[in-house]
Image: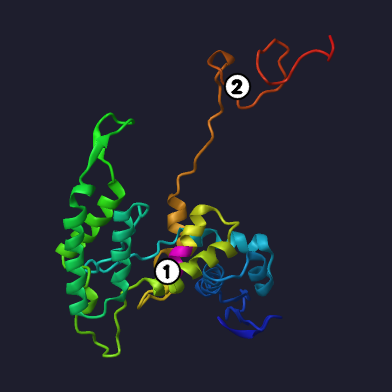
Amino acid sequence: MKKNGTTTKGTTRWRCKDTTCGASDIKRRPDNHDRAMFRAFIHHATGKYSMTECAHHHGISRATLTRRFTTYWYIDIPNTPDPHRIYDQIFIDGTRTHAGKTIYQLARQLTKITDLDQAAAWMATLQEFDTVYGTYIEEKSLSIITGRYEYTHLRVRKAYRSLLWLKKNNWLFSYLQPPTPTDPRTTWASTTNTLEGGFNSPLKLLARYHRGRSGEKQRRMIEWWLYLHTEIPDDPHTIAEHFNWGRDALAKVTVTTTNPNTTDHETGRPALYDNAIGNEYNHNLGIQKGWIGT
């Protein structure tokens, strides 16, 4: 093959050197096309751009873009969490009683502790809570639902024992004695405010932008957003190419077929499809036979 001018789009045209053949063609790179389309898919899945906006940007119809995106939904997103990292959260409820209010206030103080002396004082207060309310949280009463004796103040007891369990495992104040960071500017937070503003809020916004998507596709979009916001994510194009742009996974999807309901009326279930309205009497709220007033 040798170069033989260009097409109207500027693509180099190639012609066979054999004078008896004269075939002409252009070199196609399907991988480049997939890369371009997958880039558009990522912009749509992790941003605010709708399918219509993406299609208009690429000069194609929405239906064409939907068809080209079909296989990309089946690409597996890497999930390799750090097995040595601990993610713990405390949810406190049952604060209507005096004991509940006390344990709630005690839990709120955790976010204000900045040194080991304050931590020691807090643990002493937790021990005092057990001295004052130990008998109260162990009270039991007969349940009218199960017929067995159960803890009367279950929520307060769970809140206290959650804090006690974290204290015994030395996890409550681990942020006061963190491992030596590689970056001396690293700071350790005692709250999840950065989680709420840095991750939860954008994820809620992403779900609102694409609220018309099905649940499974919304889950995929959120997974892509989360993965691309990890510390060192791999190139999404490399991931997609590794999974053959989702084509292999799509080929393995089992096509579900709908089995017609052949059950007769004796079972109480109507047929899925029918070809007429029955004229026999049915004592139900369906189609009524006869004229009003007769």
- The residue indicated by pointer 1 is 226
Q: Residue at x 60, y 76 (%)?
A: 26
Does 278 appear above or below 231?
above
* Left or right of 268 on screen, residue 104: left
Quadrant housing the C terminus: top right
Quadrant housing the N terminus: bottom right
* Residue 94, x across and y down, in percent: 35, 52
Q: Nearer the viewer, residue 232 or 195?
A: 195
* Residue 153, x across and y down, in percent: 28, 46
* Residue 61, x across and y down, in percent: 69, 64
Give the magenta range.
222-226
Q: Quadrant of residue 285?
A: top right
Q: Quadrant of residue 28?
A: bottom right
Q: Nearer the viewer, residue 227 or 148?
A: 148
Marked residue nearer the N-terminal end (2 or 1): 1
Which mark is nearer the camera, 2 or 1?
1
Q: Residue at x 61, y 60 (%)?
A: 66
Q: Residue at x 23, y 66 (%)?
A: 83
**Residue type (three-letter) at the residue carrying disc 1:** Leu
User: Tag 1's secondary structure?
Assistant: helix
- The residue indicated by pointer 2 is 270
Are dots 2 and 1 in contact, CB under 8 Å? no
Q: Label 1: how many residues lie within 10 Å, few (<14), some (14-19) or many (20+)?
A: some
Q: Residue farthest to the bottom?
A: 184
> Spatial distance from mark 2 to mark 1, Cα to Cα?
46 Å
Residue 223 is a magenta residue? yes
Q: Residue at x 29, y 67 (%)?
A: 81
* Residue 97, x across and y down, in percent: 34, 52
In terms of secondary structure, what is the magenta stretch mainly?
helix
